[in-house]
C-alpha cells in the first residue's frame, strides 16, 4: 500500500524490513579486526576495510534476501549508543582533552586510556547486550557530527542500495544517559532534551539534503514505565522534528515491549511511521489510538531476540488484525537482529531435526519477506507449509517433551521449596563448620591460565583423552587448594578450571540444551557470547560438578564450597523455549540443579553456592510485570536449593550492587549467605541492605576484581569496618566482588593476602 502525506508527497512504503542486523561479522571478522588493531598488529586501513566489508556484506545480503527497505548506520565499531552520543557531540571533556583524532576519541570513550576512564557500560534493557552510558552535564555542548550516518548512506548508495539511516532517538538517548560526575545535584540528562533535539533537527535537514527518504529513530526507552513529563516530552520532540520543513519521512521504532501510553503520543505526532514490537507487546486495541489510522505501522511480528522459527500463520493473523487500524502495515522483526546469530546454515553439527525448528537472523529476514508477500497479495509461499510442519514436529518431539520431568514437576509441593527457619539452620551450620567470625572466602573462579584453556580446548577437540584431561584439571585444583591454604582463606573453592563459561558448562551437561558452533552474539564491543539453546524439558543425566568438588575436598580439612549456576541465570544467558511459560522452564532447570546440590551434600560437601548474577537482569521493564517475575524466579532458586539438610550452608552470589527493587526478593531467596559487589561503591549499599531487614549472612565484596589494581590491607580493613557499622560480625563474610577468572595470579595473590590480613585485624572488634 502506498500512502500520501500532504507534505511528503507519495512516500515509498517500508514494506519488508528489519530495524537492525548483527555487525560483528558472520565469522567475527570485526572482532578480529578490532583486536588486531588494538594490539598494534594492523593499522587504520585494515580496520576501515574490515568495517566497510561487513557493511557491504550486510546491505547486499539483506537486499538479496528480498527486503523492500534496508537500514543503514546499524553498523558500529563498538556500540550504537556511543555512536549516537558522538554524533550529538556528547564527548566528555576528559576525552576531548586527549587531543586524539575522531577514531581515537571514540575508542577512548569505549575502552579508556591511561589518562581517562571509559564510559560506564550497562545492560541494554533486558537483553545480554551492553551499551556505553553517555555522560551528560549542563555544560555538554551538543553539536552535530553527521559523518557516520551520512557516509554510510553514501557508501550503500554507491553500491546501488538506498537505505534508511537508523539512530537512537533523542529522548531515549538522554534516558539512557547519566549525569556527568561534576554535574550539580538534581541535574538530569533529560533536562537537556530541547538542546539535543536541535541537533537532531539539524541532522534530519542534513539527511534530507543528502536525499535520504526515510530515517529511523529508535525510542526503546518508552517500552518501559515513563513519567507523565517524559511522555509529554516525547510528544514535543516529534512535533518539532515532524514539523521541520525539510526532512526525511520519520519511522519511530520501539522494542522490548508495548509502547503503552507513549503510543497515542506518537500516533498524534506528525511522524509517518511507528515500529511496534508485537512479540513482546501486543496489537493495539482499536479505538484506543485513533491517530494510528494515519500512520504506517512496522509490525515486528518475527522475534528479533530469540532463535525459534516463526509461526507464520499466527504472524499473518496478527498483521491482518492490525491492518484495519493503520494507514499501512509494513512487516519487520520485533527488534534489531543484533541479538541473534547470523545464519543457521552455518551450523553443520546441529541436530537436523532441531535445526528445522530454528531461525537465525537470515532465516528471520526470509520470514519477514514471506509475511510481507502474503500480506500484500495473499500468496502463501511454501515457507508457510514448512513452518507448519516444523512447528507441529517441535510440539510433539520426544526430545522436547520428557514425561519423567513433567510428572516430577507436577508432583512438587510448596514444601519442596522450603527449608527450616534460617535462625535454626544457622545454629546447626555454625556448629558443623566451626568458622571464625568474618570468614574469608572467594566467589569461585581462580585465574584461567593459558595452560587450562589449552587443555580444555584439546580435550574438546579430542586431542586430549579423558584420563589426561582429568589429571591436568586435578593438578590445577590441587594448586589452587594449596594456594588458598597458604593464603589462609577459611572456605575454599576448587577454582572452576573445567568451565569455559558458567552457563555453557552446565548447558553442555544437561538434557534439553544444544550448543552451536558459530552462534556468536555480540555482548559488547568486540566481546561475543554463544548462548546455548534450551529447546526441551531439562534433566540432569549424571552428576556434573561432584567429581571436581569432592576431589578438591579430599585435599584439605577446610570446607570446600561447591559451585553451581542458578536456574534464573542459566535461562537469562541462553536462548529459551517459547512454547511454555518461563517459570516452568525455570523450575525444570531448578530441579536439575537441586539434584546436583543433593549429590554434593551426599559426598560430604558442607557448603554449596548457587550463583544468580542474572536475577536482576531479567527484571521486567514494566513494574506491573515484576511481582510475577520475582515470584517464579525466586521460587526457582528456592526449589534448586531447598533439597539439602539444615547443616548444609547455601550461598548465593548476585554480582551487582544495585539492589533497589529487588532487595526484598533477595531475602526471599532464603540463602544462608549472599555475596554482592560492593568494593567500587565503598560499601555504599550495605546500610540499605541492613535497613531492609535483611538478617542473613552477607559478603559485600571488599576487592574490585574488575580492575587490575591490588588493594592494600588498610583499604580492605577500612571497608570491613564500614560494613561492621551496619552488619553484626557474626553475619559478615569477607570476599572479593566476584570471581577471579579474568585476573592474573600476580594480582590475585597479593590481593587475597590483603583480604585475609584485613579480616584478622578486624575480627577482635566483631
Ligand atoms: N562463580 C562464578 C565465578 O567465580 C561467578 C561468576 C559471576 O558471578 N558472574 O566466576
Ligand atoms: Zn559476580
Image (tube, grey):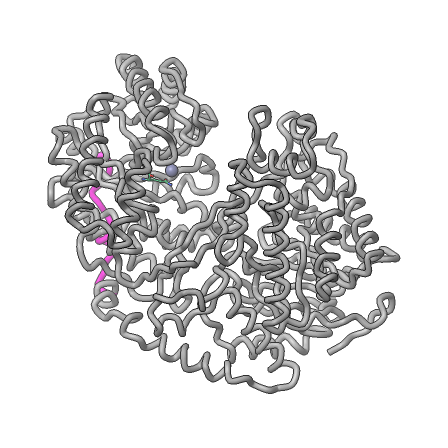
In this rendering, the count of numbered labels is 0
Range of magenta residues: 410-424
481 w.r.t. 162: above or below? above
Is 580 placed left or right of 327 in the picture? Answer: left
In the image, ligand 2 is in what quadrant?
top left
- Pick whichever, 198 or 107, lies toward us: 107
308 w.r.t. 388: above or below? above
Estimate the x, y position of residue 582 in percent, counting from the top left: 39, 60
Estimate the x, y position of residue 228 in percent, counting from the top left: 68, 49
Residue visible at 49% across and 59% down in the picture: 340
Estimate the x, y position of residue 393 in percent, counting from the top left: 36, 79
Q: Is residue 164 magenta?
A: no
Estimate the x, y position of residue 204 in percent, counting from the top left: 79, 53
Quadrant housing the C terminus: top left
Is 403 placed left or right of 172 in the picture? Answer: left
Quadrant housing the N terminus: bottom right
Q: Please tell me in which quadrant of the rendered image residue 336 appears.
A: bottom right
Can the viewer see residue 262? yes
- Pick whichever, 229 or 764, lies toward us: 764
Residue visible at 28% across and 40% down in the picture: 452
Residue visible at 37% across and 49% down in the picture: 569
Can the viewer see residue 260? no
726 w.r.t. 635: above or below? above
Amino acid at each position: 500500500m502506498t500512502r500520501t502525506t500532504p507534505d511528503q508527497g507519495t512516500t515509498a512504503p517500508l514494506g519488508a524490513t528489519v530495524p537492525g542486523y548483527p555487525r560483528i561479522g558472520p565469522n567475527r571478522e570485526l572482532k578480529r579486526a578490532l583486536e588486531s588493531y588494538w594490539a598494534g598488529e594492523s593499522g587504520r586501513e585494515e580496520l576501515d576495510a574490515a568495517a566497510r566489508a561487513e557493511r557491504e556484506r550486510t546491505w547486499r545480503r539483506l537486499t538479496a534476501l528480498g527486503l523492500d527497505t534496508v537500514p543503514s548506520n546499524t553498523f558500529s565499531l563498538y556500540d550504537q549508543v556511543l555512536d549516537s552520543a558522538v554524533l550529538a557531540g556528547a564527548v566528555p571533556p576528559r576525552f576531548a582533552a586527549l587531543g586524539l583524532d575522531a577514531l581515537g576519541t571514540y575508542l577512548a570513550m569505549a575502552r579508556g586510556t591511561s589518562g581517562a576512564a571509559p564510559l560506564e557500560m550497562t545492560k541494554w534493557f533486558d537483553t545480554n547486550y551492553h551499551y556505553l552510558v553517555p555522560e551528560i552535564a549542563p555544560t555538554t555542548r551538543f553539536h552535530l557530527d553527521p559523518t557516520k550516518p551520512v557516509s554510510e548512506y553514501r557508501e550503500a548508495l554507491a553500491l546501488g542500495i538506498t537505505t534508511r539511516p537508523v539512530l537512537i532517538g533523542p529522548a531515549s538517548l538522554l534516558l539512557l544517559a547519566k549525569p556527568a560526575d561534576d554535574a550539580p545535584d538534581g541535574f538530569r540528562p533529560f533536562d537537556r532534551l530541547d538542546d539535543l533535539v536541535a541537533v537532531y533537527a539539524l541532522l534530519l535537514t542534513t539527511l534530507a539534503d543528502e536525499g535520504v527518504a526515510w530515517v529511523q529513530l529508535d525510542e526503546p526507552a518508552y517500552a518501559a514505565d515513563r513519567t507523565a513529563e517524559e511522555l509529554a516530552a516525547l510528544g514535543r520532540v516529534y512535533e518539532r522534528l515532524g514539523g521541520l520543513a525539510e526532512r526525511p519521512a520519520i519511522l519511530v521504532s520501539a522494542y522490548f515491549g508495548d509502547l503503552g501510553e507513549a503510543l497515542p503520543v506518537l500516533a498524534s505526532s506528525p511522524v509517518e511511521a511507528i515500529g511496534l514490537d508485537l512479540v513482546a507487546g501486543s496489537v493495539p486495541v482499536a479505538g484506543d489510538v485513533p491517530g494510528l489510522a494515519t500512520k504506517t505501522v512496522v509490525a515486528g511480528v518475527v522475534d528479533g531476540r530469540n532463535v525459534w522459527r516463526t509461526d507464520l500463520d499466527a504472524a499473518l493473523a496478527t498483521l491482518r488484525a492490525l491492518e484495519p487500524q493503520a494507514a499501512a502495515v509494513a512487516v519487520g522483526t520485533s527488534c534489531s537482529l543484533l541479538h541473534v546469530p547470523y545464519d543457521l546454515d552455518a551450523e553443520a553439527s546441529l541436530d537436523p531435526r532441531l535445526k528445522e525448528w530454528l531461525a537465525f537472523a537470515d532465516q528471520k529476514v526470509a520470514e519477514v519477506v514471506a509475511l510481507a508477500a502474503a500480506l500484500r497479495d495473499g500468496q502463501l509461499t511454501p515457507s508457510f507449509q514448512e513452518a507448519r510442519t516444523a512447528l507441529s514436529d517441535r510440539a510433539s518431539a520426544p526430545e522436547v517433551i520428557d514425561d519423567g520431568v513433567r510428572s516430577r514437576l507436577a508432583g512438587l509441593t510448596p514444601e519442596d521449596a522450603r527449608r527450616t527457619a534460617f535462625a535454626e539452620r544457622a545454629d546447626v551450620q555454625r556448629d558443623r563448620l566451626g568458622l571464625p567470625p568474618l570468614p574469608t572466602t572467594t566467589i569461585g573462579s581462580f585465574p584461567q591460565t593459558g595452560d587450562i584453556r589449552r587443555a580444555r580446548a584439546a580435550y574438546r577437540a579430542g586431542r586430549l583423552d579423558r584420563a589426561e584431561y582429568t589429571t591436568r584439571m586435578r593438578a590445577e585444583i590441587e594448586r589452587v587448594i594449596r594456594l588458598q591454604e597458604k593464603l589462609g582463606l577459611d572456605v575454599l573453592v576448587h577454582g572452576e578450571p573445567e568451565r569455559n563459561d558458567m552457563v555453557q558448562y552446565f548447558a553442555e551437561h544437561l538434557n534439553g540444551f544444544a550448543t552451536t558452533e558459530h552462534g556468536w552474539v555480540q555482548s559488547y564491543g568486540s566481546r561475543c557470547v554463544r548462548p546455548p539453546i534450551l529447546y526441551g524439558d531439562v534433566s540432569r543425566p549424571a552428576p556434573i560438578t561432584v567429581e571436581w568438588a569432592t576431589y578438591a575436598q579430599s585435599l584439605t580439612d577446610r570446607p570446600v564450597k561447591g559451585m553451581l549456576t542458578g536456574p534464573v541465570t542459566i535461562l537469562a544467558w541462553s536462548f529459551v523455549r517459547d512454547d511454555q511459560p518461563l517459570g516452568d522452564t525455570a523450575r525444570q532447570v531448578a530441579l536439575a540443579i537441586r539434584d546436583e546440590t543433593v549429590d554434593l551434600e551426599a559426598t560430604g560437601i558442607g557448603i554449596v553456592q548457587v550463583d544468580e548474577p542474572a536475577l536482576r537482569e531479567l527484571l521486567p521493564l514494566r513494574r506491573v510485570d515484576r511481582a510475577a517475575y520475582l515470584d517464579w524466579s525466586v521460587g526457582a532458586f528456592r526449589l534448586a536449593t531447598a533439597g539439602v539438610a539444615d547443616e548444609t550452608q547455601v550461598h548465593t552470589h548476585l554480582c551487582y550492587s544495585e539492589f533497589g527493587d529487588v532487595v526484598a526478593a533477595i531475602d526471599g531467596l532464603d540463602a544462608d549467605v549472599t555475596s554482592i559487589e560492593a568494593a567500587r561503591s565503598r560499601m555504599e549499599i550495605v546500610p540499605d541492605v541492613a535497613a531492609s531487614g535483611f538478617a542473613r549472612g552477607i559478603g559485600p565484596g571488599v576487592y574490585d576484581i574488575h580492575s587490575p589494581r591490588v588493594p592494600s590491607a588498610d583499604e580492605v580493613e577500612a571497608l570491613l569496618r564500614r560494613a561492621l557499622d551496619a552488619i553484626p560480625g557474626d553475619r559478615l563474610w569477607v570476599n572479593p566482588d566476584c570471581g577471579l577468572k579474568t585476573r592474573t595470579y600476580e594480582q590475585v595473590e597479593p590481593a587475597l593476602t590483603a583480604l585475609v590480613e584485613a579480616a584478622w585485624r578486624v575480627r577482635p572488634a566483631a
